[in-house]
Image: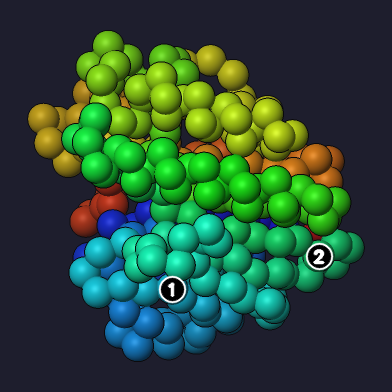
């Protein structure tokens, strides 16, 4: 089963590019971030006619996450537990049944947190505390769990072309990286690094300052796999060339293949 995550930076802006990539890459499941659409405004028919079931957790103009799946989605829940006052659409969960195993899929759009320090950074760290709690509960199920999306975390210096430029940024501050490691240390595997080592692998290039042409990127989109899911992994990769096409997102798809 091929599962991808893709921050599309607005469904309206990617109304042609996203279907074109789906037709080419043919993932079984896609976790989308920053759909920037209310649920009723999401153009689900474009994806349903391609055989995808569609579940969204939308928000007008900002944020928003969705799951596209060629298999039925069961037990869908929206919103990260732990704060009933949080109205930002950043988390969606569902179960998909493969040929061999059921998988619990979690799509997330972790807060950016800038400027840091400040209220937005406090929200990011509090959100990561809630993510840690949810991840711990998911592990307790002892079932295959996959948490994928835009984490807005640069895990290590090798995950940035110019690490010094990000030292004080919320994506790379020590507190951010420590919170990410706390989640990994529960027992999750970071899928890409389990398959590919070394610098030069990125999932985001800013629209400004010619970042794409300079390959001035960062790696902030990740899949975290429970031990049961990690045992099923056969491959993981980045569809980098998408960034150089017409009207691209500033992110590119990350995908993982599981023998599920």
Colour scheme in use: rainbow
What residue lies at 46% left-to-right and 25% top-to-bottom?
177
Dot 2: what SS? strand
Q: Position of residue 147 (x, y in %)?
A: 60, 50
Relative to 192, residue 247 above or below: below
Residue 24 in view:
no
Q: Which mark is residue 49?
A: none
In the picture, measured across the screen, residue 235 lies left or right of residue 80, that is: right
Real-space Cα separation, disc 1 to disc 2, in angstroms: 22 Å
Relative to 253, residue 92 above or below: below
Which quadrant holds residue 10? Answer: bottom left
- Which residue extends farthest right? 100
In the picture, measured across the screen, residue 64 lies left or right of residue 212, that is: right
**Residue carrying label 2:** 102
Earlier-in-chain disc, 1 versus 2 = 1
In the picture, measured across the screen, residue 94 lies left or right of residue 164, that is: right
Which quadrant holds residue 16? Answer: bottom left
Q: Position of residue 162 (x, y in %)?
A: 28, 15
**Residue carrying label 1:** 57
What residue lies at 71% left-to-right and 69% top-to-bottom?
95
Q: Position of residue 183 (x, y in %)?
A: 61, 36
Dot 1: what SS? strand
Label 1 CA crowd tier, 10 Å (few <14, some 14–19, many 20+):
many
Q: Position of residue 135 (x, y in %)?
A: 65, 48
Residue 260 in view:
yes
Q: State the residue in front, 157 or 82.
A: 82
Q: Given this view, does label 1 or label 2 mark the residue nearer the observer? A: 1
Give the quadrant of the C terminus.
bottom right
Q: State the residue in front, 72 or 144.
A: 144
In the picture, measured across the screen, residue 188 lies left or right of residue 93, that is: right
């Amino acid at each position: 089963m091929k599962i991808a995550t893709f921050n599309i930076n607005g469904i309206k802006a990617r109304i042609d590019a996203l279907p074109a990539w789906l037709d080419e890459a043919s993932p079984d499941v896609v976790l989308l971030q920053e759909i920037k659409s209310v649920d009723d405004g999401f153009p689900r028919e474009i994806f349903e006619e391609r055989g995808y079931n569609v579940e969204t957790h939308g928000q007008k103009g900002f944020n928003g996450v969705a799951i596209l799946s060629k298999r039925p989605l069961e037990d869908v829940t929206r919103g990260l537990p732990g704060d009933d006052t949080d109205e930002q659409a950043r988390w969606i969960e569902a179960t998909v049944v493969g040929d061999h195993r059921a998988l619990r899929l979690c799509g997330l759009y972790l807060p950016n947190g800038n400027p840091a320090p400040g209220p937005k950074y406090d929200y990011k760290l509090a959100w990561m505390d809630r993510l840690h709690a949810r991840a711990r509960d998911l592990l307790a199920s002892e079932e295959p769990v996959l948490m994928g999306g835009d984490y807005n975390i640069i895990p290590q210096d090798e995950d940035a072309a110019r690490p010094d430029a990000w030292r004080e940024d919320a994506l790379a501050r020590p507190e951010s990286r420590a919170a990410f490691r706390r989640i990994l240390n529960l027992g999750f595997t970071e899928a890409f690094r389990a398959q590919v080592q070394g610098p030069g692998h990125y999932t985001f290039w800013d629209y400004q300052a010619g970042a794409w042409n300079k390959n001035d990127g960062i790696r902030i989109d990740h899949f975290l796999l429970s031990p049961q899911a990690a045992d099923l992994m056969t491959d993981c990769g980045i569809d980098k060339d998408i960034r150089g096409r017409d009207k691209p997102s500033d992110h590119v798809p990350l995908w993982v293949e599981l023998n599920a």
